[in-house]
Image (cartoon, rainbow, N blue to C red):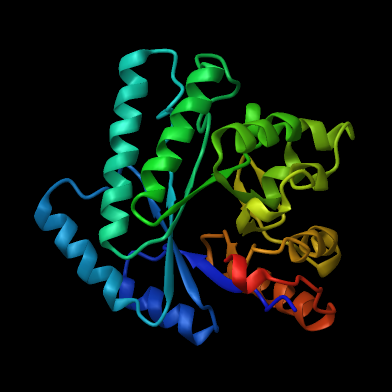
Amino acid sequence: MISPPKLALCNFLPDLKCLKEFALDHGFQGIDWTFNRENLPRTRIQEQSLAKTIYTLYPLEVRYHLFFTNRDLGDMDTEKAKNASRLFRHLCRLISRLGGRRITVHVGLGRDSATGLCWQRTVEGLADLTSFAAGLGMRVCLENLVRGWTGRPALFEKILRRAGCWATLDIGHARCCASVRNRSNKMEDFMLAHPERFLNAHIYHEETMEGHLPPVTLADMEDRLRLLRSLPLCDWWVLELREEKALVQTLRIVREYLEREPVPNAAGRAAQA
């Protein structure tokens, strides 16, 4: 039987004591820690300070999310691609020292299209990063975006297969991508070919120019949550909202679903994780 997923929240509060208290008070089991340009440690002292911070979050589990716009392993500019590779390898080493075992990355983050990206270099760069991280005991997960190659199920599947990486399914991005909106694809097309590769999910209703919106009722997300529960290794659900009221509203609806929905079968899940 598949165990209930661990529910996690983002590191959306600058006061880490308040973040931990909020998480535990609301019954969360983990923190999805986003690294970006603003909070990236620049020195050894900053890295040591971060390590102390992460350790204070126990007993919450921590997984990691790399959010760097216009930093692509497949950039057509060779020097930019090399810089991206150096950054992501550095973060893999840092996260490994922090005890992390799962990281989520992107292809084309911050771009309106795949213009400026090389397909072959993208696949090879992601495969290389996946291999490098595996040597540190980590799994690299590619997230689907609204636009670009990962917003098209067939191309998302090809990248996963050819790069040999794992996956994070963002159900808000999947709802809003053009191929789903125009009904040439369904959300399940993102996962049908490789259901065993999905380790994480990002949970909210949809993404707009204003940001991530919470569901109003369970009906807004029920079908998508049911699809997530069919994924044998997807045990980490990040409620990806950064405003307390919206986050608590989404948490209530996700819990309503989990209490109502029968637990699906997935023989061997624990052995594969």
Position of residue 93 measured from the top left corner of the image (x, y, whole percent): 27, 50
In screen coordinates, is 33 left or right of 99? Answer: right
Which residue is pictured at 80% across the width and 31% down the height? 179
Depth check: 89 or 61 in front? 89
Residue at the far left in the pictured view:
45
Q: In which quarter of the image is residue 85?
A: top left
Q: The C terminus appears in which quarter of the rendering? A: bottom right
Residue 75, placed above or below residue 110: above
Q: Which percent across, then down, holds residue 22? A: 45, 79
254 horizontally vs 185: left or right: left
Q: Which residue is drawn at 69% across and 36% down?
A: 157
Q: In this view, does 156 lie above or below 57?
A: above
Instruction: Specify the quadrant that holds the N terminus.
Output: bottom right
Question: Quick check: can you spot residue 39?
Answer: no
- In the image, taking residue 258 as reference, residue 125 lies left or right, namely left
Establish if 39 lies above or below 177.
Answer: below
Residue 105 visible in the shown view: yes
**Could you say where residue 36 lies in the image, as x and y percent from the top left?**
36, 45
Residue placed most toward the observer, 156 or 180: 156
User: In the depicted view, which residue is nearer to us: 122 or 267?
Assistant: 267
